[in-house]
């Protein structure tokens, strides 16, 4: 047996001390590395700082082990637990109990076994304004998730809950956790993020677990599922979740190995969803083909039904940083860029539909040139406008000539005027206008009445 194992089984002589700082030399003497020993000392000092100070000063509590090089969690180093630390956790619990100024708690890079969770979770329960809890590589196992499920069933303040590098892989535990999330009165955001380069830390272990967790997330506003290595079946599970049209507004699916084929499923689901606003698909295996599939869920310039469908105006799916203008110019054609600008502006629904109608009127039949999408030829069928009331026709003609933001940036003034006149000309030529004077000719009876009035005068 190693010296570390022997000492862990020997009586804990120092446990009777009330959270006395245990020096690095002691940790190294029982088998820990110098890095681990120093990190344990710094963790104790951080806990002491929170215990000794006035909690009125703190709204965020961060326990992140550090060695001489800085925070060890940044290097995917997890500080294993030793029972010698239990008195420190107990003192930390006592000092935090009932502190209502604390809103956020971050526990990063330190293992939290059940013995520690049983100490600190009741304390979190007593902090009435605690709204965010982040657990980064804390070594949660099935028992730990069960403890958190019990905590959530009693808690009424948590709004954000994030897990990094802790795997949920038991269906019964996932069921308990899902039920707790679903019934929680305030939880708005939840995240499961795997750790890059660590195959055993991928968050949701399989598609059965994923489906069960998603059942509990039907009321959350934001859902982050990053680096979970979903396969095509996982994409199908997520498609069902999107199609169900839950009130979720943000779905973050970065780094999940999605392909172009998966975008077909996601695009079909978006057509049934009227709540989702952001679908983050960055750093997946999605090419321009997949981007085009996603774009079809937002807008089809050859179909007025697609252009005016409510679900097509709520969500913006993106595969790269949408605020990076240089990236946009490289990857997107003009009309795609303009379409994304419409969604980024988050205008009211009626204005968004209006701008898309104008965009459709300015586009023609699609063709591919060197991998980019252009439009030439005839406008799409204008028969959709045949039944428009006469009173709004002037406004429609005005909108057809309107210059959108993209064209103002990209086109010179002379070209803008030519484009506007061209759109107006093609519209008037192809539009079967209502009989403008159908109701303007006087009826015979009305004419006789006017003659009688004149005769009487």
Image (cartoon, helix red, strand yellow):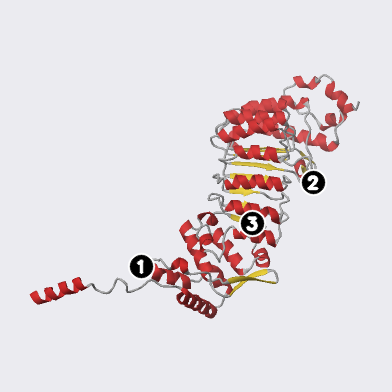
* Vertical side of 91 occupied by 423: above or below: below
Q: At x 84% / y 29%, what residue is drawn?
A: 26
Q: 179 and 272: which one is in front?
A: 272
CB contact under 8 Å: marks 3 and 2 = no
- Quarter of the picture holding the C terminus: bottom left
* Vertical side of 185 occupied by 249: above or below: below
* Vertical side of 398 occupied by 17: above or below: above
The residue under label 1 is 391
Q: At x 24% / y 73%, what residue is drawn?
A: 442
First in sequence: mark 3 or mark 1?
Answer: 3
The label nearer to you, 3 versus 2, is: 3
Q: 442 and 106: which one is in front?
A: 442
Mark 1: which secondary structure? helix
Residue 280 seen in this snapshot? no
Task: Report which quarter residue 48 is drawn in.
Answer: top right
Mark 3: few/some/many CA within 10 Å (<14, 14-19, 20+): some
Q: Which mark is residue 318?
A: 3
Horizontal and vertical percent for residue 422? 51, 78
The residue under label 2 is 197
């Amino acid at each position: 047996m190693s010296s570390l194992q022997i000492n862990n089984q020997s009586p804990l002589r120092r446990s009777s001390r009330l959270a006395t700082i245990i020096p690095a030399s002691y940790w190294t003497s029982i088998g820990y590395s110098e890095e681990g020993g120093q990190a344990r000392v710094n963790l104790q000092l951080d806990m002491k700082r929170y215990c000794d100070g006035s909690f009125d000063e703190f709204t965020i509590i961060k326990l992140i082990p550090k060695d001489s090089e800085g925070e060890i969690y940044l290097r995917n180093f997890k500080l294993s637990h030793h029972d010698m630390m239990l008195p420190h956790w107990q003192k930390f619990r006592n000092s935090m109990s009932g502190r209502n100024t604390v809103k956020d708690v971050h526990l990063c890079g330190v293992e939290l076994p059940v013995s520690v969770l049983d100490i600190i979770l009741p304390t979190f329960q007593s902090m009435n304004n605690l709204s965010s809890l982040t657990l980064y590589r804390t070594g949660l196992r099935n028992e730990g998730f069960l403890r958190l499920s019990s905590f959530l069933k009693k808690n009424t303040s948590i709004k954000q809950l994030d897990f990094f590098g802790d795997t949920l892989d038991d269906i019964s535990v996932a069921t308990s956790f899902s039920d707790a999330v679903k019934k929680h009165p305030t939880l708005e955001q939840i995240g499961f993020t795997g750790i890059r380069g660590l195959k055993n830390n991928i968050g949701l272990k399989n598609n059965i677990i994923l489906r069960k967790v998603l059942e509990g997330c039907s009321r959350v506003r934001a859902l982050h599922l990053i680096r979970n290595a979903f396969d095509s079946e996982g994409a199908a599970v997520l498609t069902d979740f999107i199609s169900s049209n839950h009130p979720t507004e943000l779905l973050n699916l970065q780094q999940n190995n999605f392909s172009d084929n998966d975008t077909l499923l996601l695009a079909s689901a978006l057509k049934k969803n009227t709540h989702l606003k952001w679908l983050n698909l960055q750093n997946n295996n999605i090419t321009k083909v997949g981007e085009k599939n996603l774009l079809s869920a937002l807008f089809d310039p050859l179909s007025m039904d697609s252009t005016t469908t409510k679900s097509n105006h709520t969500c913006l799916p993106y595969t790269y940083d949408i605020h990076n203008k240089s990236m946009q110019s490289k990857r997107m054609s003009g009309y795609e860029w303009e379409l994304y600008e419409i969604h980024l502006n988050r205008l009211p629904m009626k204005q968004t539909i209006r701008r898309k109608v104008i965009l459709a009127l300015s586009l023609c039949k699609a063709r591919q040139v060197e991998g980019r999408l252009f439009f030439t030829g005839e406008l799409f069928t204008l028969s959709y406008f045949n039944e428009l009331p006469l009173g709004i026709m002037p406004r429609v003609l005005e909108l057809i000539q309107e210059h959108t933001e993209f064209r103002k940036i990209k086109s010179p003034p002379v070209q803008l005027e030519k484009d506007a006149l061209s759109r107006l000309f093609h519209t008037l030529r192809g539009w079967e206008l209502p009989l403008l004077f159908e109701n303007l000719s006087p009826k015979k009876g009305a004419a006789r009445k006017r003659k009688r009035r004149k005769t009487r005068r």
